[in-house]
Structures are given as C-alpha cells and as structure tokens.
C-alpha cells in the first residue's frame, strides 16, 4: 500500500509540474529586459524595456518618440487575470497598460482603454529590438 501512495504522489507531481509555473503568484514583474511590441498611430513599433524593482525604462526603441519611455508596475488582481497581472503606468510616449504574464514567460499587453491592438512582450537577454532567432 505504501508503494501505491508513493507511485500515486509521483504521478500527480509529474502531471501537475507543467502547470506549476502558471499557477505561481507573481508579486512583482520579474527583473530583466523585455522586447515590447506596441502599436503607435497604427504602426507596429518595438522597444526594449529594462525592468528592475517594478520600474521600467526604455533602453532602445525603433521609434525616437518612445526612447524616453519609463514607468512603474503595480500588481493588478482580479478574477479576469488571476495573480499574474500588473498595471503599467508609463510616461513619455506610452499610456497605461495591463501586463498579463503567460505560463511561458511571455506577456499579453492590453492598453487602457483597450482598442484591440495586438501588443506583447517577451523576456530577452540583451537590449536588442530585434526578435530572438528561433532554432
């Protein structure tokens, strides 16, 4: 019987492990660089934001009007987004946004107010505004 429970516990852990990161509560936006794709005046633009301690600052952008973007994040809790969403309040080129972290680390971005733009962010290792090459 003891062997049954050990095997059962192992199987539950194996089945649930892919979902563990998704259910993890984020207390703050993970530090690092994010390649952000936004729509500005109907055109897709990219900027690289460096996040540290829930504060963000643009380090590189495809549009000079976004070069001075900076802001901060606050947790946004609610039944629609769970425990993995943050309100971003930006200055100097971007308005307020809601960042919703997905299980793979990417971010769905919704403008406030949302006009249906397709905006997103992905964590990157450097300050490039070019998407990482896929293997």
Image (tube, rainbow, N blue to C red):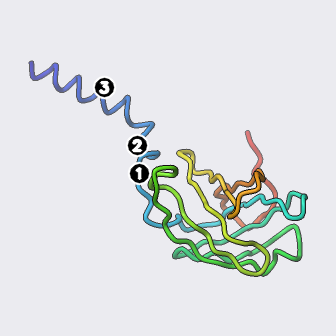
Compared with 54, 15 (above or below) is above
As drawn, the label of residue 126 is none
Place residue 83 in its image quadrant.
bottom left
Judging by the rendered image, the residue that carries numbered circle 2 is 20
Q: Nearer the viewer, residue 9 or 63?
A: 63
Judging by the rendered image, the residue that carries numbered circle 3 is 11
Compared with 94, 122 (above or below) is above
Q: Nearer the viewer, residue 64 or 97?
A: 97
The alpha-carbon separation of the residues under discs 3 and 2 comes to 14 Å
Compared with 88, 11 (above or below) is above
* Residue occupying the point 53% across, 58% down: 85
* Residue occupying the point 70% across, 62% down: 113
Judging by the rendered image, the residue that carries numbered circle 1 is 24
The alpha-carbon separation of the residues under discs 1 and 3 comes to 20 Å
User: Is the N terminus in the top left, top right, bottom left or bottom right quadrant?
Assistant: top left
Q: Position of residue 91 (x, y in %)?
A: 72, 80
* Of pointers 1 and 3, the one earlier in the residue sequence: 3
Contact between marks 3 and 2 (CB within 8 A): the answer is: no
Place residue 104 in its image quadrant.
top right
Residue lying furthest left in this view?
A: 1
User: Is the C terminus in the top left, top right, bottom left or bottom right quadrant?
Assistant: top right
Classed neighbour count for the residue bearing mark 2: other residues with Cα under 10 Å, few (<14), some (14–19), many (≥20): few
Label 3 secondary element: helix
* Residue occupying the point 81% across, 57% down: 130
Q: Position of residue 69 (x, y in %)?
A: 74, 77
Contact between marks 1 and 2 (CB within 8 A): the answer is: yes
């Amino acid at each position: 019987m003891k062997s049954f429970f050990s095997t059962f516990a192992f199987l539950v852990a194996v089945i649930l492990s892919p979902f563990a990161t998704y259910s993890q509560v984020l207390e703050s936006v993970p530090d690092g660089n994010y390649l952000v794709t936004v729509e500005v005046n109907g055109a897709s633009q990219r900027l690289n934001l460096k996040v540290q301690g829930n504060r963000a600052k643009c380090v590189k952008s495809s549009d000079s009007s976004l070069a001075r973007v900076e802001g901060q994040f606050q947790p946004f809790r609610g039944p629609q987004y769970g425990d993995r969403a943050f309100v971003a309040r930006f200055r100097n080129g971007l308005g307020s946004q809601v960042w919703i972290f997905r299980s793979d680390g990417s971010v769905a971005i919704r403008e406030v107010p949302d006009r249906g733009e397709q905006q997103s962010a992905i964590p990157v290792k450097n300050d490039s505004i070019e998407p990482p090459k896929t293997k």
